[in-house]
Image (cartoon, rainbow, N blue to C red):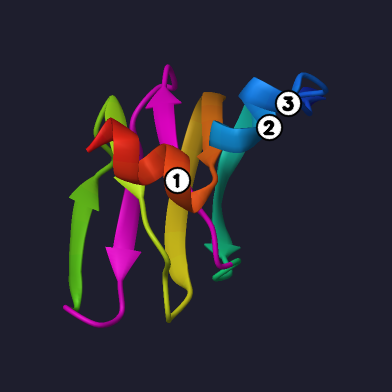
Amino acid sequence: MTKSSNIYIPNNEVEKTFIKCIWRLSEYDIQERKEIILPKGTVEIIFNFSDKINYFSPSYKIEKSLPDVFVNGINFKPFELTKTKQQKFLGVQLNSIGLRLLF
């Protein structure tokens, strides 16, 4: 399995006002497995360039495919991903003012 990740933390004051960080995660040659995502108290826009990934929401007791782009809000309960083949994500964590101005 090959795995890589990067994180960019803004150092410019204007960028810091809106963006907490930008991150990238890539993982290849994955055997099918489950991963639990714990709540972390941030809001982020996530771009999903992965092969099919399903998620299970314990609140609604449903399983769905992860969309290509989604806003991951402040989660109160963990959710479960079922990953296969390869995983590629690009995420932008926003500060509250950045989120407000965007929407």
Cα gap from disc 3 to disc 1, whole angstroms:
13 Å
Return the mark for residue 13: 3
Q: Nearer the viewer, residue 45 or 80?
A: 45
Quadrant including the N terminus: top right
Q: Hey, what amino acid is under mark 3?
A: Glu
Name the residue at 60% across, 35% down.
Answer: 17
* Residue lying at 55% horizontally and 62% vertically, measured from the top left: 37
Location of the C terminus (image quadrant) = top left
Q: Is residue 55 magenta?
A: yes
- Label 2 close to label 3 by CB (< 8 Å): yes
Above or below residue 26? Residue 41 is: below
Q: Earlier in the sequence, mark 3 or mark 1?
A: 3
Looking at the image, residue 9 sits to the left or right of residue 98; the answer is right
Q: Quadrant of residue 9?
A: top right
Residue for badge 2: 16
Magenta residues span 41-60
Name the amino acid, label 2. Lys
Q: Quadrant of residue 16?
A: top right
Residue 8: x percent and y percent?
Answer: 77, 23
Residue where numbered disc 1 is placed: 97
Q: Residues within 10 Å of mark 1 (few under 14, many from 20)?
A: few
Task: Give how far apart the Cα atoms at labels 2 and 1 are.
Answer: 10 Å
**Residue 50: percent from the left, percent from the top?**
44, 22
Label 3 Cα neighbours within 10 Å, binned few <14 / some 14-19 / many ≥20: few
Other residues around mark 2 within 10 Å, as few (<14) / some (14–19) / many (≥20): some
